[in-house]
Amino acid sequence: MTIRAKTLLSLAITLIVLTVVFYFALVRIVSDGFAAVENTLAIRNVDRLRETFASEIESLCTKTSDWAVWDDAYQFVQDRNPEFVQANIAPSAMSGMNLSLLAFFDAQGEVVHATSYNPKEDKLVPVLPAILSAHFAARSELIRHARADGEKSGILFTPGALPLVYCSRAVVPTSGEGAVRGADVFAKSFD
């Protein structure tokens, strides 16, 4: 083999080796960069989701508190007066508060009143029994409040139903003091 052929062969081999090394180094650098960017975006999106849930729950708990710390609701949980339901629980009230579910429970955990809102038909409908039995049975911790300022909130997952963001508050007089007579639960679909 001539010197010229050897030189061309060694240059070709060197060029191929350098190209392969450069390619793998570039792929590693670029893929690590993209992985870091994707990781940062995923963390940012999870934080946004957490903030959205926290905001939804805070807003819902404010509305729940308005109803739970109210003399009329306090009396309703005890006497189950149907006039309270007629005067206060209507499709327009549920729609205005963007609620999917509203329920009152007495101190023993029994349902005093529970209703769901169907926005497509703009009417009140019964709460799915699966939701009540899975999350709000008589011994459920979600509706047990030992103190007047008791509050529980989160997300409920029920097979066959949309996830619900919920807030449960102790039902007490407007003064905020007195015996806890039960729980008021507001929930909204989170779709």
Image: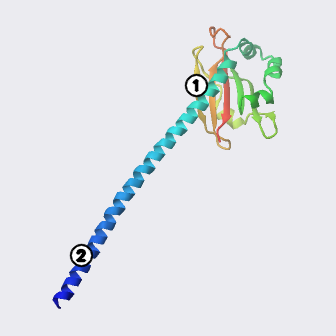
Q: Position of residue 45 (x, y in %)?
A: 51, 43
Q: Which sits in the foreground, 118 or 12?
A: 12
The residue depicted at 63 percent of the width and 21 percent of the height is: 169
Residue plotted at (73% across, 14% down): 78
For residue 17, what is the image quadrant?
bottom left
View extreme (bottom): residue: 1
Amino acid type shown at disc 2: Thr
- SS for tag 1? strand
Q: Residue at x 80, y 16 (%)?
A: 81
The residue pinned by badge 2 equals 14
Measured along the vertical axis of the image, is residue 179 above or below residue 186?
Answer: above
**Does residue 167 appear to the left or right of 98 in the view shown?**
left
Quadrant for residue 130, please give it.
Answer: top right
**Residue at x 63%, y 10% (from the top left corner):** 176
Give the mark, 1 or 2, whose residue is nearer the N terminus. 2
Mark yes or no: residue 19 visible: yes
Indicate the quadrant containing the N terminus: top left, top right, bottom left or bottom right.
bottom left
Q: Which residue is mark 1?
A: 152
- For marks 1 and 2, give the one nearer the viewer: 2
**101 lies above or below 162:** above
Give the alpha-carbon distance from disc 1 to disc 2, as whole Å.
69 Å
Q: Secondary structure at mark 2?
A: helix
Mark number displayed over residue 132 = none
Alpha-carbon neighbours of circle 1 within 10 Å: few (<14), some, or many (≥20)? some
Q: Amino acid at mark 1?
A: Lys
Q: Residue furthest left?
A: 3
